Amino acid sequence: MDGMGSVKYAELGAFLRSRRERIRPGDVGLPSGPRRRVPGLRRDEVAQLAGASVDYYNELERGAGSQPSEQMIAALARALRLTADERDYLYHLADRPVPVQDGPASHVHPGMLDLLGRMTTTPAQVITDLHITLVQNPLAVALLGDQSGLRGHRASFVYRWFTDPVARDLYPEADHDRQSRSFVADLRAAAARRDGKDAEAGSLIGALLDASPEFAALWADHDVAFRRDDRKRLIHPVLGPVEVNCLHLFSEDGRQRLLWFTPAVGTDSADLLDLLAVIGTQDVVDPTGTGFTAGGRLSPP
């Protein structure tokens, strides 16, 4: 069992089962149905929500199988709507280190996760104040690309924006300067809102100052402004330009944001977003291996 004790592994299975049984299907956007034999979710539903195979999840609840990865634990915590304390306990039972706050595997604010689950007709995602994407709904993946699997500074879109030219393909070139200034001002506001000794924000800013003369020049301007809403043009590889309003909902501490995208009035974006739901994440491939994924390039706004 990859170094896990049988007693602790049995506790992990029992804990997963107890959390599964307390959730109603409607809490996670699933239909209740007339023939449900259990009060909570079925094992196959948890597996589907976490992106795991049914057999693998069944093994976990039985206290058998291989040790779950940190990514799988994060996915299970979100699927089961765990609190921050419950999430940390799950990592403990799996003998995995608890992720740093605001990292790619950070615990998503339960209220935001609930709202995200209810947004089934519009692209939406939850990001941190350092622009690390935590979770996306299917339409956001289709519009913006899948941002899962990124680690280190590259997990932040701001870092990719200033260090990877591919990241800018999501926006028309005419909008790049405005977006650069907006990202820098927002990052300065986020860093100021944190403790002045915050290691994660300091490390990201230091890396950007070293890697990008453009970022360094803009940082020296000392502009500060949170991004709260924006009208922007996005370039989809199949649909072409899509003009949307990007709206932000902040968590109480400001470290997480729910973003959702609505069609801009006076454009054909409503029809394009309807088409997006039809084509989903199909018909787009990555011939170069540079991050061009099913929904577009690996670059959130």
Image (cartoon, grey):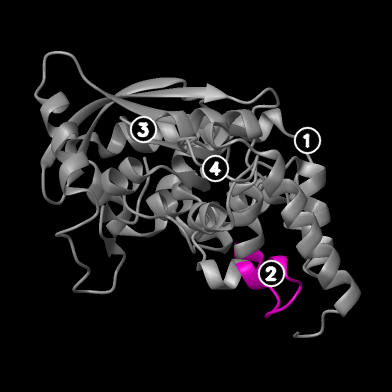
Q: Residue at image x 77%, y 37%?
A: 196
N-term-proximal mark, 4 vs 3: 4
> Which amino acid, mark 1?
Asp
Magenta range is 58-71
Q: Who is closer to the viewer here, 67 or 175?
A: 67
Left/right of residue 249 with respect to residue 179 in the rendered view: right
Q: CA distance from mark 1 to mark 3?
A: 36 Å
> Which amino acid, mark 4?
Arg
Residue 12 image-quadrant placement: bottom right
Examine the rendered structure and indicate whether residue 206 appears above or below residue 266. below
Examine the rendered structure and indicate whether residue 231 appears above or below residue 49. above
N-term-proximal mark, 1 vs 3: 3
Q: Is label 2 in contact with label 3 (beta carbons under 8 Å)?
A: no
**Image quarter hosting the N terminus:** bottom right
Q: CA distance from mark 2 to mark 4?
A: 22 Å
Q: Is label 1 in contact with label 2 (beta carbons under 8 Å)?
A: no
